[in-house]
Image (cartoon, rainbow, N blue to C red):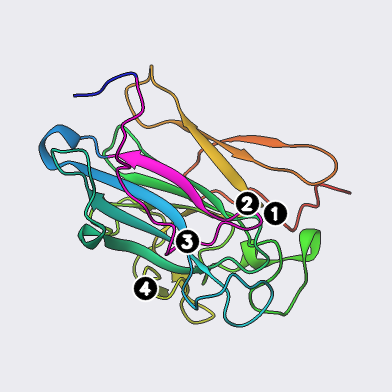
Amino acid sequence: MFKNNLLSTPALNLSSRICSDSERGLLGVAVDPQFNSNRYVYLFYTFDKFNNCATNTANVPVNRVSRFTLSTNNVIDPQSERVLINNIPSYAGNHNGGDLGFGKDGLLYVSVGDGGCDYAGNSGCAASNDAARDKHALLGKMLRITKTGGIPTGNPFRGANTARCNVSGRTQVGKTCQEIFATGLRNPFRIAFAPNVTGTKFFINDVGQDAWEEIDQSRRGADYGWNSVKENA
């Protein structure tokens, strides 16, 4: 089925839905572990929700994770989209994160940056942006969901004082988003899975500021320190 050449017909054209300015765009692609039978493809992209690609306003584009179905003729019907996570604000245009991939546990892992500037407007930009500390929002986090968008039983934040954040990208202050696997990340642009282990092991490549970059081994419920640990200190 697959050939080492570019097909003349694009599998999917999302140009009318996407903001591609700054660091926005189609940022991540993952193929379902059972692709041969279900034909599912997962995308992380910046959705042009308000028909503008503004920054630092109330109506900014949002990042979302969606599942599409690739037909046997190698074309995706845009109407096959099933949105799994939505409305993560791309506030300053940068620090979207945007990688996603399946672990050997069959679960989908999603990296999300802190948005560059604080979506809530109560801190600032760059090292002053504390969005990654907000457990009621999906920014600056590693997320873990099932292939249908559900919450795995082993996720660290479930039960009392937690809530789903897949529709609005956040919940009320004082609660924790159930999709969160780990917190405290600046711009985890890429993740990499270890292939030669029996379980799921992956590394988070977090883009640094001024002083160093980070490669963090994944840990359930971990806090990787941004922005309370300043990388430019």
Q: Which residues are magenta?
A: 5-31
In the image, taking residue 84 as reference, residue 97 lies left or right, namely right
Task: Measure the alpha-carbon separation of dots 2 and 3.
Answer: 24 Å
Q: Dividing the picture into quarters, in which one does residue 78 lie?
A: bottom left
| Mark 3 in CB contact with mark 1 (< 8 angstroms) | no
Outermost residue to the right: 233
- Position in image of residue 100 (x %, y %): 42, 44
Amino acid marked by disc 1: Trp
Mark seen at residue 167: 4
Of the residues tagged 2 and 3, which is closer to the observer?
Answer: 3
Q: Which residue is mark 2?
A: 185
Mark seen at residue 124: none
The front one of 224 and 122 is 122
- Position in image of residue 11 (x %, y %): 29, 43
Q: Which residue is mark 1?
A: 226
Task: Measure the alpha-carbon separation of dots 1 and 4.
Answer: 25 Å
N-terminal label among 3 and 4 = 3
Whether 47 is among the magenta residues is: no
N-terminal label among 2 and 3 = 3
